[in-house]
Amino acid sequence: MNLIIRKMTLEDLEAVVAIDQVSFSLPWPARSFQFEVMDNEASRCWVVEADGRVIAMLVGWLIVDELHVATFATHPDFRGQGIGKKLLLHALRIAQEEGVVKSFLEVRAGNQVAQKMYREFGYVEDGIRKEYYKDNAEDAILMSLNDLSRLPGG
Ligand SMILES: CC(C)(COP(=O)(O)OP(=O)(O)OC[C@H]1O[C@@H](n2cnc3c(N)ncnc32)[C@H](O)[C@@H]1OP(=O)(O)O)[C@@H](O)C(=O)NCCC(=O)NCCS
């Protein structure tokens, strides 16, 4: 597979929304992605393209010196092939070049796959938001990465 990681554009929205819908029980409306790409200056929006097809996406918010991972998913047909890790690493490295030193995110308490990946990056659990998710009142685990200089691969 010929993988390219690049900035999300409006042309990607259909594919991005499709990935979001199959990945999350509370997907974002298309207009939210449009806002992130077009209007939100704090937003850093990335896609992974494989042989011309968008197969993963990540939206991060750059808040002072922190990158908040707002949404992030790989299309189910392409999971478990290292694509998510490459994308997260790319987003964190570019953010680091912009002066970011920390990252944080919320993840569903039951999402063991994502939590394992974040732990491999050095994120640690530092709190719980009780019943954060509206669809099933699931708790959110707050995770933070406090030293971007210790990313996998240096
Ligand atoms: C989380 C997600 C983005 C990972 O994307 P991916 O392309 O599959 O990720 P990778 O193949 O790079 O795997 C990254 C790590 O995830 C974990 N992982 C992936 N598939 C897994 C599985 N089936 N079981 C357990 N852990 C798994 C592992 O820690 C893996 O690292 P390793 O292979 O070195 O052990 C993807 O599973 C996804 O889109 N999930 C649904 C949306 C979601 O949960 N997003 C995160 C919200 S906070």
Image: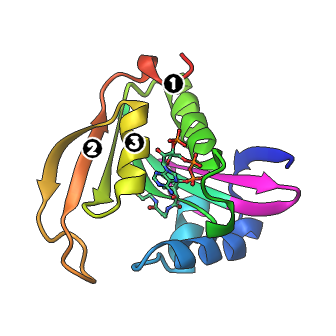
Residue 30: percent from left, percent from top: 57, 78
Determine crowd level at label 3: few under 14, some 14-19, many 20+ residues with C-alpha closer than 10 A: many
14 left or right, relative to 26: right
Regarding mark 3 in the picture, which secondary structure is present there?
helix
Q: Look at 68% across and 60% down and name the residue there.
A: 78
| Residue at numbered disc 1 | 152
Residue 110: percent from left, percent from top: 28, 64
Which amino acid, mark 3?
Tyr
Determine crowd level at label 2: few under 14, some 14-19, many 20+ residues with C-alpha closer than 10 A: many
| Mark 1 Cβ inside 8 Å of ligand 1 | no
| Residue at numbered disc 3 | 118
For the record, the magenta segment spans 38-55
Residue 45: percent from left, percent from top: 59, 52
Q: Main secondary structure of the magenta part?
A: strand
**Of residues 136 and 147, the one drawn nearer to the viewer in this rendering:** 136
Q: Look at 68% across and 67% down and name the residue there.
A: 77
**Which of the image's four quarters has the C terminus?**
top right
Which amino acid, mark 2?
Met
Inspect the magenta stretch and tell me whether residue 49 lies in it. yes
Residue 88: percent from left, percent from top: 54, 42
The answer to the question of whether label 1 and label 2 lie on touching residues, with beta carbons closer than 8 A, is no
Determine crowd level at label 1: few under 14, some 14-19, many 20+ residues with C-alpha closer than 10 A: few
| Residue at numbered disc 2 | 143
